[in-house]
Amino acid sequence: MSDNNSPKPYQLLEAELLPKLRQGDKQSLNRLVEAYYGPMRALARSIVGDSIADEVVQEAWFSVYKALPKFEGRSSLKTWILRITANEAKTRLRRESRQVSLEAISGGETDLLPGRFQDDGHWAVPPSSWHDESPDALLTNQEMGDCIEWTLGRLPENQQAVFKLKELEDHSFDEICNILEISASNARVLLHRARVSLYGKIEHFQESGEC
Amino acid sequence: MLKCKDIVDQASDYREREMSFGQRLQYRMHLLLCHHCRTFSRQFNASVAMLKRLRKREDHQEQIEETKRKLENL
């Protein structure tokens, strides 16, 4: 059983690196790049798309480098860096005159699992039975894993961003609100929408064997 | 009385205990009485547990090295 009070690996890394980073130590900065490039790219990709995600991450690193001496430690370094990344991504979208509102709940009026319920709110098309419902069994299916990643990449950007931060990077809702500058209630709604969409895809795959 | 659609809408709140005692009781009552929603709830929880373990199988080493080089030259 995991202990929620024990420090996460990134917290241990930050405790070790932060004093050296404040002194401008480039080796420590390199270790930070190694550790956080992946999460930064995943977040940038969910906001700006795949093609310019790396450019956004590089811009974010320049901003991080410039701002490091001013880092006050009010959040973890990782949360702070991811917030800078989200801001760089939003700035980039704005520059390209694309929509930037992570706060808006995309598809807010649409039903979860559309077409599955009668007007009275009971199941019209109930869940089908699956061969094996254990997470381990679901994980072993490589084709389904690919299908889920494909589906995840097509969710609305704000759902992707919250889902990746919460489920893949294990951030708390407080941290997510801080990084994306959205309210806790919206973060919860966005996460739930992403989960139900992905559940729907898993169910479809279980039934048809196709993505 | 909750409807099946409410069970889907509130599944994450139930899972993460973001409900009052009364709401939770109503949710459990519905699950007790509704076979389809029990199936949904079981599968939804399995899906979330599985999704948490998804990790992107991406290799960014080239971009990491490029970023390090650029930062080195600042």
Image (tube, coloured by chain):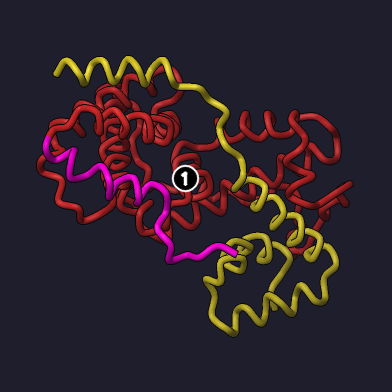
Query: Is A198 on the left-hand or right-hand side of A48?
Result: right
Q: Which chain is red?
A: A
Highlighted range, magenta: A1-23
Query: Is A8 on the left-hand or right-hand side of A111?
Result: left
Q: Quadrant of the C terminus of chain A?
A: top right
Q: Is residue B65 magenta?
A: no
Residue at 69% in and 74% down: B2
Q: In the rendered image, is residue A187 in sight?
A: yes
The residue indicated by pointer 1 is A169
Q: Residues within 10 Å of mark 1 (few under 14, many from 20)?
A: some
Q: In the rendered image, is residue A91 in sight?
A: no
Residue at 44% in and 25% down: A49
Q: Secondary structure at mark 1?
A: loop
Instruction: State whether residue A121 is above or below residue B51.
Output: below
Closest to the observer, A106 or B73: B73
Q: Quadrant of residue A2?
A: bottom right
Q: Position of residue B47 (x, y in %)?
A: 69, 50
Write down the colour of chain B: yellow
Q: Position of residue B41 (x, y in %)?
A: 73, 62
